[in-house]
Amino acid sequence: MSDEWVDVGSTDDVPEGTVREFTLGHSRIAVIRRGDDWGAISGTCNHVGGPLGQGRLDGDYVVCPWHYWKFHWQTGAGEPGYEADRVPSHSIRIEAGRILVQRSA
């Protein structure tokens, strides 16, 4: 994995309990905030390319707005019974009100 951390935006852009779309290089990512915890997964659903960053939270899962496939908000694993239908996840950290996401190698 790369050691490069990329500033993708402000924490103010992601209200509590929401999913927001950001760009990491040339890729879309979905950034999720639950209280003081954060997650970052691919912004593209592996079903037919729906925009996960425009989805919503349903418990521990981000729901794709196109066909309602679900992915764990931190690991990217599919919902129970479909865990192998995962999307990539990214390490994330917060520093001085900024969202930093680790670029995959």
Image (cartoon, grey):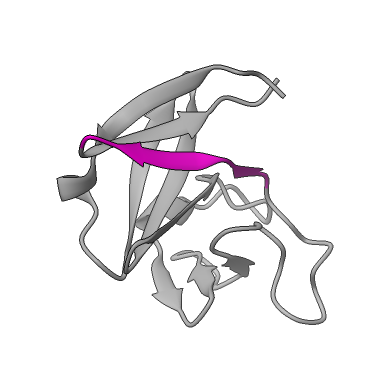
Report the residue at 44% width, 48% height from top: 30
Left or right for 95, reference 6: left
Left or right for 98, reference 23: left
Q: In which quarter of the image is residue 17?
A: bottom left
60 and 53: which one is in front? 60
Report the residue at 38% width, 69% height from top: 56
Q: In which quarter of the image is residue 44?
A: top right
Left or right for 87, reference 93: right
Q: Is residue 95 magenta?
A: yes
Residue 102 vs 16, above or below: the answer is: above
Residue 27 in the image: state x and y as whole percent.
51, 28
Report the residue at 80% width, 73% height from top: 82
Which residue reaches farthest front? Answer: 96
Report the residue at 40% width, 32% height from top: 100
Which quarter of the rendered picture does the C terminus lie within?
top right
Residue 97 vs 86, above or below: the answer is: above
Which residue reaches farthest left? Answer: 12
Residue 101 in the image: state x and y as whole percent.
47, 33
Q: Give the range drawn in magenta.
A: 88-96
